[in-house]
Image (cartoon, helix red, strand yellow):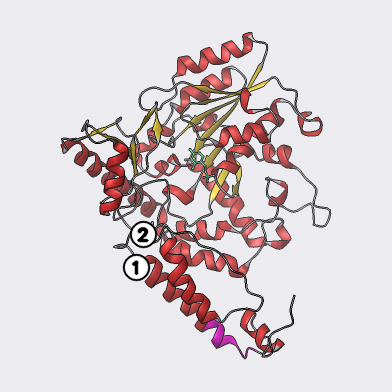
């Protein structure tokens, strides 16, 4: 470590990084904020006509001994970082479940950072603890999960699914929280379910091999008879089924399992019933899709990511539970350094210190209203119908299956042009950025129609 630079002045340094209580640098800090606003509006949002990725070369960091001038740093961000980002602002990007965030949630995210309250405990985030608790009940009610429903925001759907499996394990075998697990528990999800379920089985100590992946039909919906016979087989082998999930919006085809039927099977075998609606949950906002959510009242837990189909800037995901007691039983740590009579979210999920993402979500819902959410969801369904129509009208493309949500799977029907080659051609032409998932042994093309100006 060398010395400070010759021109280092502690007061100047402090004033560049914090507001001075004498307020002498307040205008400087404001100007810096405006610089960021310009950077975001001009160089991030206003790039809809630019390439999906301008510069695919690798980037090497270089941390200096002495801090750089801010103007140099911003110039480097503009010239070196932004061209290397994936441009979700481009309406022809439809690759994965990544939405362009609503403007309100971009600015709200900066507000969350500025306030920097901590969801660990009530005393560190009183108003956000209230907002998060009420939002969780609001969403739980929206899905019809019953009057005792509750939940917690999480840093993503994977963490919500992992948490659900942990709750299920502790519910089925209460001593496992203290003693670890005996290894005869078995969980059931469809073969189209997200990979986070494998991760979860590893985390909860039950093991990936005790996750049974049940066959799906050509659209990616779980086959109910296969689910039942898989459960029966497990019981015959002397093992204990403990967890069954239905998926609302599978990762490849956006299929929605028959929630009510899967829930009934789960209950018949005394299993925890989870619904992974990380993607599809937003469908609840439109009457066009509401019938798909019949049976949510059977769910013990549910995952939903507003950061996907509700256009909230990351991160914003949640785990809902039928009964708040599940979270208490599942996670009750102790916070000896806090008031433990208060509602402390740090005792209700796997994270400790956590951002107050509830502010972003609440602001988004307030400014759009329920009708605004419905409009955006329905609009994306309409845009994806246009895309389907385009595929239907084309002579060298075909649909892989009939879409349920705003996810369209297609493939090349031109024998001389593979879907993979077609995808690359479209990306090179700047025509469309689709993903290339493996589906039933074949590489296909997937479009997730989330951009409100897609097409
Ligand atoms: C996206 C997704 C997940 C994982 O959520 P992350 O936020 O990426 O961790 C889980 N399940 C489904 C169905 C998803 O679509």
Q: Could you tell whether 115 is left or right of 34 in the image? A: right
Task: Find numbered disc 1 in the image and state the secondary structure of the residue it sits on.
Answer: loop
Residue 46 disc label:
1
Left or right of residue 24, residue 313 in this image: left
Tell me the chief SS of the magenta region. Answer: helix
Find numbered disc 2 in the image and state the secondary structure of the residue it sits on: loop
Residue at the spot 33% in from the left edge and 58% down from the top edge? 90
Which residue in the protein does label 2 denote? 89
Relative vertical location of residue 413 with respect to residue 367 in this rendering, above or below: above
* Residue 118 occupies quadrant: bottom right
Is residue 255 something that shows in the picture? no
Which residue occupies 42% across, 48% down?
309
Instruction: Report the magenta residues as a range.
Output: 23-30
Q: Position of residue 62 (x, y in %)?
A: 59, 68
Q: Are marks 1 and 2 in contact (CB under 8 Å)?
A: yes
The answer to whether residue 206 is left or right of residue 228 is right
| Residue drawn at point x = 53 percent, y = 19 percent | 265
The residue at 54%/87% (across/down) is 27
- Lower position in the chain sequence, tag 1 or tag 2: 1
x, y percentage for residue 393? 16, 37
Disc 2 under 8 Å from ligand 1? The reply is no
Residue placed furthest toward the right: 336
Q: Nearer the viewer, residue 5 or 88?
A: 5
> At which x and y percent is residue 376?
34, 51
Quarter of the view holding residue 402: top left
Q: Quadrant of the N terminus?
A: bottom right
Query: Label 1 vs label 2: CA separation?
Result: 8 Å
Query: Does residue 29 belong to the magenta stretch?
Result: yes
- Examine the rendered structure and indicate whether residue 225 appears above or below residue 281: above
Instruction: Determine the image quadrant of residue 209.
Output: top right
In-front residue for pair 266/90:
90
Q: Is residue 271 above or below residue 391?
A: above
């Amino acid at each position: 470590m060398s010395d400070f630079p010759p021109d280092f002045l502690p007061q100047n340094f402090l004033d560049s990084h914090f507001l001075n209580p004498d307020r002498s640098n307040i205008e400087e800090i404001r100007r810096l904020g405006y610089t960021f606003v310009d950077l975001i509006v001009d160089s991030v949002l206003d790039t809809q006509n630019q390439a999906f990725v301008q510069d695919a070369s690798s980037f090497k960091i270089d941390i200096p001994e002495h801090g750089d001038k801010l103007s140099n740093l911003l110039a480097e961000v503009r010239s070196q970082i932004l061209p290397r980002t994936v441009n979700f602002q481009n309406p022809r990007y439809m690759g994965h479940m990544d939405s362009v965030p609503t403007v309100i949630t971009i600015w709200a995210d900066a507000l969350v950072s500025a306030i920097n309250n901590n969801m660990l405990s009530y005393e560190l985030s009183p108003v956000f603890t209230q907002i998060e608790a009420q939002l969780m009940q609001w969403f739980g009610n929206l899905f019809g999960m019953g009057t005792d429903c509750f939940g917690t925001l999480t840093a993503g759907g994977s963490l919500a699914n992992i948490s659900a499996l942990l709750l299920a394990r502790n519910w089925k075998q209460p001593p496992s929280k203290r003693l670890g697990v005996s290894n005869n528990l078995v969980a059931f999800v469809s073969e189209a379910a997200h990979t986070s379920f494998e991760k979860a089985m590893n985390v909860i100590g039950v093991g990936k091999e005790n996750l049974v992946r049940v066959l799906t039909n050509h659209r990616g919906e779980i086959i109910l008879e296969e689910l039942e016979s898989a459960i029966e087989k497990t019981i015959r082998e002397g093992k204990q089924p403990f967890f069954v999930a239905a998926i609302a919006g599978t990762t490849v085809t956006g299929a929605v399992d028959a929630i009510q039927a899967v829930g009934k099977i789960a209950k018949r075998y005394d299993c925890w019933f989870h619904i992974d609606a990380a993607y599809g949950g937003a469908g609840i906002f439109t009457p066009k899709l509401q019938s798909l959510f019949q049976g949510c009242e059977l769910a013990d837990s549910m995952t939903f990511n507003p950061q996907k189909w509700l256009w909230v800037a990351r991160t914003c995901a949640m785990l809902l539970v039928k009964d708040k007691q599940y979270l208490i039983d599942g996670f009750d740590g102790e916070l000896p350094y806090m008031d433990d009579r208060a509602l402390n979210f740090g005792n209700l999920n796997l994270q400790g210190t956590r951002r107050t993402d509830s502010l972003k979500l609440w602001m988004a819902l307030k400014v759009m209203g329920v009708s605004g959410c419905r409009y955006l969801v329905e609009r994306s369904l309409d845009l994806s119908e246009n895309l389907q129509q385009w595929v239907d009208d084309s002579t060298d493309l075909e649909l892989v299956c009939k879409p349920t949500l705003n996810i369209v799977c297609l493939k090349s029907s031109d024998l001389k042009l593979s879907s993979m080659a077609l995808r690359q051609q479209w990306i090179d032409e700047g025509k469309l950025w689709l993903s290339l998932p493996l589906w039933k042994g074949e590489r296909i093309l997937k479009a997730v129609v989330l951009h409100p100006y897609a097409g």
